[in-house]
Image: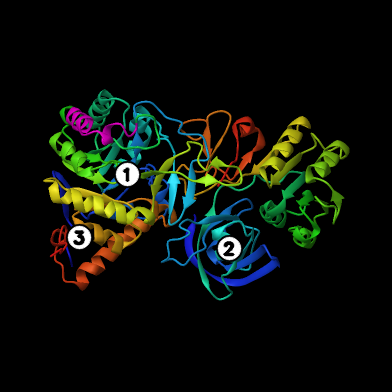
Amino acid sequence: MPQRILAQIIEQRELTPSHYRLRLAAPEIAQTAKAGQYVHVLPRATHSFDPLLRRAFSIMRAAEDAIDILYRIEGRGTALLARRKAGETIDVLGPLGLPFAPLTTHNILVGGGVGVPPLVLLAAQAVPEVRIQALIGARAATEIIGQEDFRDYDVPVEVATDDGSAGHQGLVTDLLERQLSQSGLTGQGLTVFACGPLPMLRVVAAMSQRYKVPCQVSLEENMPCGVGVCNGCVVPVLGAGDDYGNYRRICVDGPVLWANEVNWGHYSGDSC
Amino acid sequence: MASLATQLGPLKLQNPIMTASGTFGYGEEIANFMDISHLGAVVCKTVTRAPRAGNAPPRTCETAAGMLNAIGLQNVGVERFITEKLPYLRQFAVPLIVNIAGETIEDFGLLAQALSQQAGVAALELNISCPNVAHGLDFATDPVLTEQVVAHARAATHLPIIAKLSPNVTDITLIARAAEAGGADAVSLVNTFVGMAVNIHTRRPRLSNISGGLSGPAIKPLALRAVYRCAQVLGIPLIGIGGIMNAQDAIEFFIAGASAVQVGTATFVQPGAALEVIQGLESYMDKYAIASIKELVGSIITT
């Protein structure tokens, strides 16, 4: 059950001038959060009204009664969030949304940019019997997210950077193609889990379909309420959709969807 | 303890705080965050005759102290509303106000008739002012059409009727009086203000619908003045809507002449916002020794 809590900031760590990792004291959320779920965070003080709405962040770590989120400064909300300091409290609603499906025998986690965090929690919550390979894409070496976390969980990591400053120079989907074509695991209980920019997710979804590998994607949209009442965060899906039409609210019926449920041809993802 | 008991024509409420249509779904989700039975009334999401898928995304965009939305009246349609949503809403010991919208005057009559036969519907709110669907604003921008649509619904139901008005007009008092003349038991105002936002990097509108309805604290002063002006000329109660985030905001509306208020966008930020407004209102009335909310309504001093 989601809770609204005033969480104390344990640590606000600057990873790069635009990337921050925030650790919050949130026992109620940490104890129940499942990988793929998110928290809805109010970056402003409760009695200011601008920016008005909460921001959604995937939970990256849930342990020792604390949760971690990781974000890049994108706009007014995240800029404000980055100025909050350890010891201050912050209004948090969560855990929200549906988690990833259970891991299978073999799993490939594909994360792009600040899309890596929910995959880190997925690896953290894995039982020892499952095999996991993590693939991380970033613009440059300095912006690689989650590499150390995956190593802590003994998950092998391959990296791709746009500028070649670390790992493969190119796209993380190049690494996925190599894995899918060489691993010989397709059809052997292999599942792909992906979170990242929409262009990356499109390619991951299409590639998984081509190799007949089940694939889950974690999507992002403007999410005014996070609890399913505003119908603002819908994405087009194939089939029945969200009760009324071929849309699904990703706040409560996502953010994780099976890639073959998404109507990629009608999905612009043109969020504001 | 101050009395919050409120009467809107024939409709009796335990307190004057209700949810705004389109911000509360059909209650299932918000029930996780608040005890719905403490509200004055519940106004559920707009119901139309046929199901509507709504507009293509992106449907919302945050703006300065507010947000734009162009959901497009996504809803299950009246038949499924009655079989799937109403049984859930009926269980709460709170009057249920069903918000309805039609493309034609006849649609409003048919919806009013269909819902009048259902147990657990306390009143109807006519959404004659949705800015995000074709012809959605036609009724509430024309006093003649407003009177006609209200009168048509009036003839089709014994239930109290609330006409929800648009602020996107030259003189809202003319529309409010037309609703009263058509037989409305109350008016609710305001629906959202039509607005837009542009992504300067792509030069595209931020909403797929190009324009959307602006809500939130940004519109509160505008809504408050609309309520104040209508309160001067109407003989029926007003329900104030527009950027109410907390009890102070709601109290401004009561003083300006609203007999009740609806909490909308605030629910997106705090799912339990409406209950916090009730608690804050009780504290205010105790502090100023106001025995009944009726003493507060329209108590503005302008001399």
Within 10 Å of disc 2 (Cα), the crowding (few <14, some 14-19, many 20+) is some
- The secondary structure type at the circle numbered 2 is helix
Using the rendered image, report if marks 3 and 1 lie on a common chain. yes
- The secondary structure type at the circle numbered 1 is loop
| Residue at (35% x, 37% y) in the render | B130
Proximity of marks 3 and 1: CB atoms separated by less than 8 Å: no
- The secondary structure type at the circle numbered 3 is helix
For mark 2, name the chain: A
Percent coordinates x, y for residue A251 in the rendering? 53, 46
Q: CA distance from mark 3 to mark 1?
A: 20 Å
In the rendered structure, does residue A52 fall within the stretch colored magenta?
A: no
Q: Which residues are magenta?
A: B136-152
In the rendered structure, does residue B149 fall within the stretch colored magenta?
A: yes
> Going by the image, does B242 lie left or right of B293?
right
> Going by the image, does B82 lie left or right of A241?
left
Return the residue at label 2. A79
Within 10 Å of disc 1 (Cα), the crowding (few <14, some 14-19, many 20+) is many
For mark 3, name the chain: B
| Residue at (80% x, 60% y) in the render | A151
What kind of residue is marked 2? Answer: Ala
Using the rendered image, report if marks 2 and 1 lie on a common chain. no
Looking at the image, the residue that sits furthest to the left is B235
Return the residue at label 1. B191
| Residue at (60% x, 72% y) in the render | A10
Percent coordinates x, y for residue B112 in the rendering? 24, 30
Percent coordinates x, y for residue A82 in the rendering? 60, 66
Q: Which residue is more in the foreground, A190 or B257? A: B257
Which mark, residue B255?
Answer: 3
Proximity of marks 2 and 1: CB atoms separated by less than 8 Å: no
> Going by the image, does A197 lie left or right of A42?
right
What kind of residue is marked 1? Answer: Asn
What kind of residue is marked 3? Answer: Ile
